[in-house]
Amino acid sequence: MSQGKSWLKALLEIIKIIFEGSRKNATPRTWHQHVVPYKDGWAVRREGNKRITSKHRKQSTALRKAKSIARKRKSDVIIHREDGTIRDRISYAET
């Protein structure tokens, strides 16, 4: 094996070790659904996501959608007020 190929192989091994190590320390993603104010209405957003899952004119419609997803994923629904603070939390996690 040439010196260039052995150097590349060693570099790839180091990158692999770093990547795997960083993933082990990462907090696993959840499926918690947040009902949040969005423009002139409300949105459902998965915890940790920047993009919204769905947008709605009424909070009650957004809440219904969030509950449906949370039931399927056995997660929580976090309901926010218009100012963004948390109003309530509903858990569908198995106990």
Image: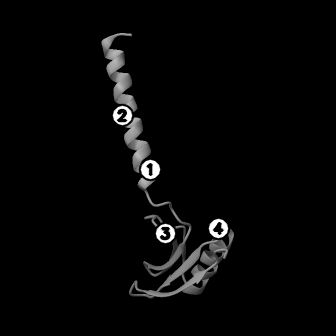
The N terminus - image quarter:
top left
Specify which label sits upstream in the sequence, 2 or 4.
2
Residue 65 image-quadrant placement: bottom right
Name the residue beneath numbered marker 2.
14
Mark 2 and mark 3: Cα distance apart in space: 32 Å
Name the residue beneath numbered marker 4.
73
Q: Amino acid at mark 2?
A: Ile
The spot of residue 83 in percent (x, y) is 38, 87
Q: For marks 4 and 1, give the one nearer the viewer.
A: 1
Mark 3 and mark 4: Cα distance apart in space: 13 Å
- Secondary element under disc 4, as helix, strand or loop, is helix
Specify which label sits upstream in the sequence, 1 or 3.
1
Name the residue beneath numbered marker 1.
23
- Badge 2 density bin: few <14, some 14–19, many ≥20, Cα 10 Å: few
Specify which label sits upstream in the sequence, 2 or 3.
2
- Report if the CB atoms under discs 4 and 1 are less than 8 Å apart: no
